[in-house]
């Protein structure tokens, strides 16, 4: 059974990511609607690679901290899920509709977290931030390979499952940063 604390922390982390996503939607519209899965994977790669560089060098020359990068990965993951479900939809979408899409996709991600947290316990609480980043990078490489295979897999989960895992690893990292157990 999941602790109430995890549920509350998870929802708070999601709320902060959603707030940023919606603010950027008002600023930029839905310009991200042009992104294909490989482009979203590349954006995720840039964010994860930067966090890994910060972990290894302990030096940042760009203002954005690791917390901001993890939040960005949550939001790019949501963009990925939206684009997979409606790749040829309208380029411009009203922010209210975008908010609905965000909530629908996040509900799927949340349910996945609940299911996996039930089966695995809260093993993620004992993981290092470095492991989260390495697992995210692995998921990105899987997405790239699936795209190269024209979306086909023989026995593995699809692109959507990899986006879901990236979102959840990022949210777990954000929770542990908030707790002070990982650096932000």
Image (cartoon, helix red, strand yellow):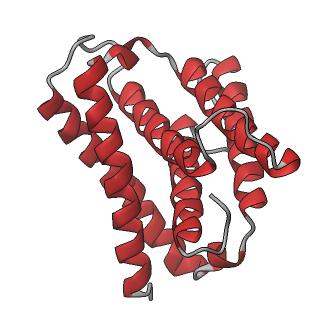
In the image, what residue occupies the spot 68% across and 40% down?
48
The answer to whether one can see residue 10 in this image is yes
Quick check: 4 left or right of 68?
Answer: left
Q: Is the C terminus in the top left, top right, bottom left or bottom right quadrant?
A: bottom right
Q: Is residue 87 above or below residue 131?
A: above
Q: Is residue 6 above or below residue 134?
A: below
Q: Nearer the viewer, residue 146 or 110?
A: 110
Where does residue 104 sit, x and y in percent of width and height? Answer: 26, 46
Query: Quarter of the image holding residue 124?
Result: bottom right
Where does residue 77 sit, x and y in percent of width and height? Answer: 48, 39
Q: Nearer the viewer, residue 49 or 167?
A: 49
In the image, what residue occupies the spot 55% across and 75% down?
179
Where does residue 87 sit, x and y in percent of width and height? Answer: 37, 18
Quick check: 52 left or right of 146?
Answer: right
Quick check: 78 left or right of 86?
Answer: right
In the image, what residue occupies the spot 61% across and 28% down?
41
Where does residue 109 sit, x and y in percent of width and height? Answer: 41, 54
Q: How many marks?
A: 0
Residue lying farthest to the right in this orientation: 57
In the image, what residue occupies the spot 81% across and 41% down?
53
The answer to whether one can see residue 105 in this image is no
Q: Is the N terminus in the top left, top right, bottom left or bottom right quadrant?
A: bottom left
Q: Is residue 46 above or below residue 180?
A: above
């Amino acid at each position: 059974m999941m602790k109430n604390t995890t549920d509350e922390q998870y929802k708070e982390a999601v709320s902060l990511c959603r707030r940023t996503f919606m603010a950027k939607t008002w600023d930029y519209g839905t310009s991200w609607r042009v992104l294909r899965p490989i482009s979203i994977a590349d954006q995720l790669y840039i964010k994860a690679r930067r966090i890994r560089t910060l972990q290894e060098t302990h030096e940042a020359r760009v203002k954005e901290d690791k917390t901001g990068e993890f939040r960005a990965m949550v939001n790019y993951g949501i963009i990925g899920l939206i684009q997979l479900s409606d790749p040829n939809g309208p380029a411009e979408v009203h922010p209210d509709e975008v908010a609905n899409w965000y909530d629908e996709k996040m509900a799927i991600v949340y349910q996945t977290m609940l299911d996996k947290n039930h089966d695995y316990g809260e093993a993620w609480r004992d993981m290092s931030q470095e492991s989260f980043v390495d697992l995210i990078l692995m998921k990105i490489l899987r997405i790239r390979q699936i795209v190269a295979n024209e979306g086909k897999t023989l026995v593995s989960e699809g692109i959507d499952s990899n986006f879901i895992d990236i979102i959840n690893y990022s949210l777990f990292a954000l929770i542990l940063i908030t707790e002070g157990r990982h650096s932000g």
